[in-house]
Image (cartoon, grey):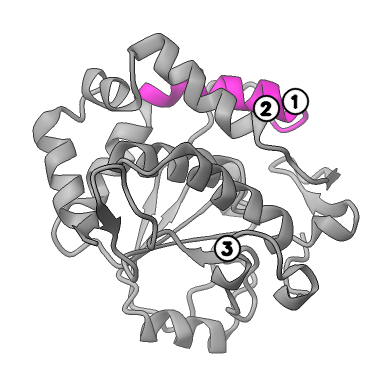
Amino acid sequence: MDLTESRTVADHHDLPGADRLLDIPGVRNARDVGGFSTADGAKVRTGLLYRTGWLAELTPEGAGLFAKLGIRTVFDLRDPAEIERWPDRLHDLDAAAAHHPLLPQNGEDHYGKPLAEAYDVITDTAADTLPALLGRFAEPGTLPAVLHCAVGRDRTGISVAVLLSALGVADRDIVDDYLLSNLGLGVLDGPQEYVDGNGVVRLTDTVGPELITGTLAALRTRYGSVEGFLSEAGLGPDGLARLRDVFLEPA
């Protein structure tokens, strides 16, 4: 998977949040998760969590930029086979590696499934993975951190959407952040090749809002709310309070 070709956001400057994309050499689809306002008037802190594509092609210069951002932890949502085939290249970056596979580790091949079906699989098994992941964010010494999967859109997108929703960010902002991956991956100019976890070359194209809104809707239907999902899955009121203390500041 070649994710190193750079793009200028000026080509699509009218997209919401286009100026949030970061230029990290060897990394695609990078941006700060913070900056959004919440329904109760708070704001998600910047400089704490960054979402990206994989770091298998991170350059020493890119690692130096992450060091300047103070990155302490790299959260990898990929399967063990993906990590073994394309390990993160952190160079001299002094950061801990944390692996939280978001797809079920049941031996089933999920890579060739349509995206909507893959998102349903992740939603069905989210209670086994997402609360533990979000809980780690609130642990002392963990942040600032990088969160990534392969291209930084699907597994990463679902994780970020759940986090932002739990923090009180409006769905319209969550959708805008999710759709920014279309620009971050360069697919607005046509489908791009990538290599899945089995080493198969596939094409990825633009995504619409229905994938992420459908995921949030499924969690809310099943659990009453995203907060209800996290609480029932093990990240109770105290855990949510810690998460909000870490990520939120007065507007």
Q: Where residue 8 sits: x, y (%)? A: 74, 78
Q: Contact, CB < 8 Å: mark 2 with mark 1?
A: yes
Q: Where residue 189 sits: x, y (%)? A: 88, 60
Q: Main secondary structure of the magenta part?
A: helix
The image quadrant that residue 54 belongs to is bottom right
The image quadrant that residue 21 belongs to is bottom right
Q: Contact, CB < 8 Å: mark 3 with mark 1?
A: no
Q: Name the residue that disc number 1 marks.
A: 113
Q: CA distance from mark 3 to mark 2?
A: 31 Å
The stretch drawn in magenta includes residue 32 = no
* Secondary structure type for disc 3: loop
On screen, residue 157 above or below 152: above
Q: Residue furthest left?
A: 238
> What amino acid is found at the position of numbered circle 2 in the picture?
His
Q: Nearer the viewer, mark 3 or mark 1?
A: 3
Q: Contact, CB < 8 Å: mark 3 with mark 2?
A: no
The stretch drawn in magenta includes residue 118 = yes
Q: Where residue 99 sits: x, y (%)? A: 41, 48
* Secondary structure type for disc 2: loop
User: Is disc 2 surrounded by few (<14), some (14 to 19) or many (20+) residues within 10 Å?
Assistant: some
Q: Name the residue that disc number 2 marks.
A: 110
On screen, residue 127 above or below 46: above
Q: Name the residue that disc number 3 marks.
A: 17
Horizontally, residue 237 falls left or right of residue 223, namely left
- Magenta residues span 111-127
